[in-house]
Amino acid sequence: MQSIIEPLAVLASDYVKATGEALLLDPVKKELVEVKTLPVGNQALGLMRAAVDTAEKLTEEAKNDAAAEMRFASRVSFASAIIVMMTLIGSVIFTFVGVARPLTRLNGALGKMAAGELNVEIPGASRGDEVGDMAKTVVVIRENAEQKARVEAEVQSGQDSCRTAQAGHAQAG
């Protein structure tokens, strides 16, 4: 039995010794936790809180900046839309005043010429654009028509003179 008790006594002695060492290490462990680990953990927690606060602050600033940019973009879009609208209105007015009205006047002059009135003034002939080019062409047509009318009148006058002379010879003969 002694052979059984001796190993148990050695184990018990080792257990007591290990427990004593563990009890001696408890204050060291407590000191490590309280003196070194807790301050580092608290410092880390403080840094994390500061980082979160900074991130929240930066996020709020970014939101405000984005909102300001959106307002600016909206103003620019609105101004662009107004400019486009004004350009469209201007082009409509230009088309009416610069093209449609002169073409209507030119058409009226062409109508008078077609009716036989060749001394009509051709509107827009002094313009330097396409409407002016058309008016200049109408002036040439009018001048050609006047020339043709003069030639026909001269021919008619000559024929009338010949007929009168022939009629005079026929009565005398």
Image: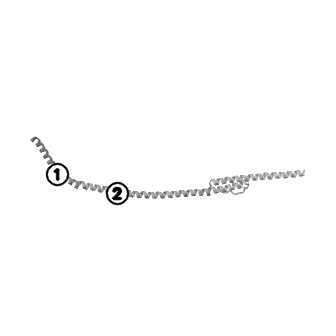
The earlier-in-sequence mark between 2 and 1 is 1
Disc 2 vs disc 1: which is toward the camera?
1
Q: Which residue is mark 2?
A: 54
Percent of width and height locating residue 108: 68, 56
At horizontal 16% and vertical 49% (from top left) the residue drawn is 19
Instruction: Confirm whether residue 4 shows in the render.
Output: yes
Q: Nearer the viewer, residue 147 or 132?
A: 132
User: Given the image, on which type of amino acid does mark 2 rest?
Assistant: Thr
* Quarter of the picture holding the N terminus: top left
At horizontal 52% and vertical 57% (from top left) the residue drawn is 81
Percent of width and height locating residue 125: 66, 56
At horizontal 27% and vertical 54% (from top left) the residue drawn is 41
Instruction: Confirm whether residue 125 shows in the render.
Output: no
At horizontal 85% and vertical 52% (from top left) the residue drawn is 165
Dividing the picture into quadrants, the one containing residue 101 is bottom right
Task: Tell me the SS state at disc 2.
Answer: helix
For residue 16, side relative to residue 42 (left or right): left
For residue 168, side relative to residue 124 (left or right): right
Q: Which residue is mark 1?
A: 23
Q: Nearer the viewer, residue 111 or 74?
A: 74
User: Given the image, on which type of amino acid does mark 1 rest?
Assistant: Leu
The answer to whether 11 is drawn above or below residue 75 in the figure is above
Measured in 3D between alpha carbons, the distance from the residue under mark 2 to the one under mark 1, in whole angstroms, is: 45 Å
Q: Residue furthest front?
A: 1
